[in-house]
Image (cartoon, grey):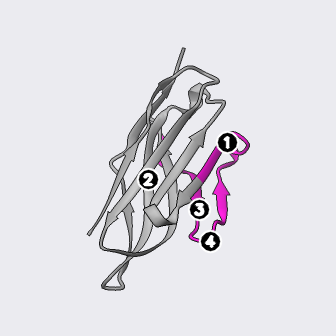
Amino acid sequence: QVQLVESGGGLVQPGGSLRLSCAASGSIFAINVMGWYRQAPGKQRELVAAITMVGSLTYADSVKGRFTISRDNAKNTVYLQMNSLRPEDTALYYCNANVRTYDLARSDYWGQGTQVTVSS
């Protein structure tokens, strides 16, 4: 199977920066899309940013110009650089990967989540 391990969350003051990382491992043949979602208390999970294998990007309007998603295909790792953080960015951030495994099945996998708290 496939495992996603996230790191990089924490507490930061408004205006600060954090960088999230998510490494995928296991029976990976190829990863199409990798992305970050977030869920704040009492709200639905929402897409923050996504990147395809060839580098096509998608961002939520609320993070455009502040967040940058990137990936290292050789390491099966996706990153989220978050700048100019706001209190409303506080949420549990989840990594997602659409993976084709060696048996050629394709499935979505999720990380365990990493907490980002923006507060003074």
Residue highlighted by disc 3:
51
Residue highlighted by disc 1:
62
Amino acid type at image mark 4 = Val
Q: Marks 4/2: CA distance?
A: 18 Å
Vertical placement of residue 102 versus 20, above or below: below
The image shows a total of numbered marks equal to 4
For the residues labelled 1 and 3, say whether their Cβ atoms are less than 8 Å apart.
no
Vertical placement of residue 73 versus 93, above or below: below
Lower position in the chain sequence, tag 1 or tag 3: 3
The residue that appears at 58% across and 67% down in the rendered structure is 52
User: From where the camera sits, is residue 101 visible?
Assistant: yes
Q: Marks 1/4: CA distance?
A: 24 Å
Q: Position of residue 99 (x, y in %)?
A: 41, 72
* Residue bounds of the magenta highlight: 43-69
Outermost residue to the front: 74
Residue highlighted by disc 4:
54
Q: Marks 1/2: CA distance?
A: 18 Å
Mark closer to the observer (3, 4): 4
Residue 46 belongs to the span the image colors magenta: yes
Lower position in the chain sequence, tag 2 or tag 3: 3
Which picture quadrant has residue 113?
top left
Amino acid type at image mark 1 = Ser
Amino acid type at image mark 2 = Cys
Residue 54 belongs to the span the image colors magenta: yes
Mark closer to the observer (1, 4): 4
